[in-house]
Amino acid sequence: MEANNQTLTKSDLLWKKSDAAGWGLLFIWTGIALFTSMGWGAGILGVGLIILGIQTARYLLNVKGEGVWVVAGLFLTLGGAWELFHIRINLIPVLCIAAGVALLGTALAGRFKHQTDARTPTL
C-alpha cells in the first residue's frame, strides 16, 4: 500500500486504523448519548474511556501512542465521573494540586533532560 510515493509500515497502518476506529467510536458514542439523553456526566465519561481505550490498544499493538490524548482521556474520564456521581468537591483545584504534585515529583526525582553546565540544570 502506498501513500505519497512512500510505503507505509505495519506500524503506520495500525496507527491509521486505530485513529479511524477511535473517531468512529467517538461519533457512535456521541449519537447514542444524544439519542438517549443520558446527560453530560455519562457522555463525557464515555468519551474519556474511548480515548483511553484507543491509547491502550496502541500501546498493546506496539504503535506509538500520544501522551496528550492519554492526559485528555484521564481528565475527561475524571470529569465525567465527577459529574455523573455528583461529587461536591470542585474539580479544578484538585486537578491543579495533582498537576503541581506531578511536576514537583518530577523535579525532585531529578529528571533533567539535558545539562549544559553541571551547576545549571535545565528542564
Image: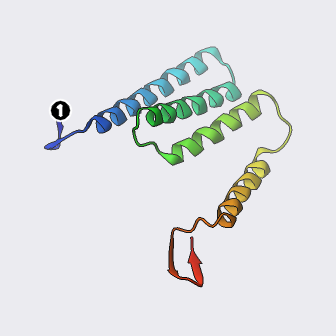
Picture residue at 63% right of the left edge, 67% below the top: 110
Q: Nearer the viewer, residue 70 or 88?
A: 70
Q: Is residue 29 left or right of residue 13?
A: right
Give above or below for 49 relative to 37.
below
Q: Nearer the viewer, residue 101 or 60?
A: 60
Number of labels in the image equals 1
Q: Quadrant of residue 23?
A: top left
Q: Nearer the viewer, residue 34 or 4?
A: 4
- The residue sitting at the left extreme is 5
Q: Position of residue 118 (x, y in %)?
A: 56, 83
Picture residue at 41% right of the left edge, 43% below the top: 64
Q: Position of residue 101 (x, y in %)?
A: 73, 57
Q: Is residue 9 left or right of residue 96?
A: left
Identify the image quadrant of the C terminus.
bottom right
Q: Amino acid at mark 1?
A: Met
- The residue sitting at the right extreme is 88
Identify the image quadrant of the N terminus.
top left
Q: How is the image coloured?
A: rainbow
Picture residue at 54% right of the left edge, 24% below the top: 30
Give above or below for 82 relative to 37.
below
Picture residue at 55% right of the left edge, 42% below the top: 70
Question: Crowdedness of circle 1 by 10 Å Cα count: few (<14), some, many (20+)?
Answer: few
Q: Position of residue 5 (x, y in %)?
A: 13, 43
- Residue position marked by numbered label 1 in the rendering: 1
Element carrying mark 1: loop
Q: Quadrant of residue 15?
A: top left
Q: Is residue 9 left or right of residue 25?
A: left
Q: Quadrant of residue 78?
A: top right
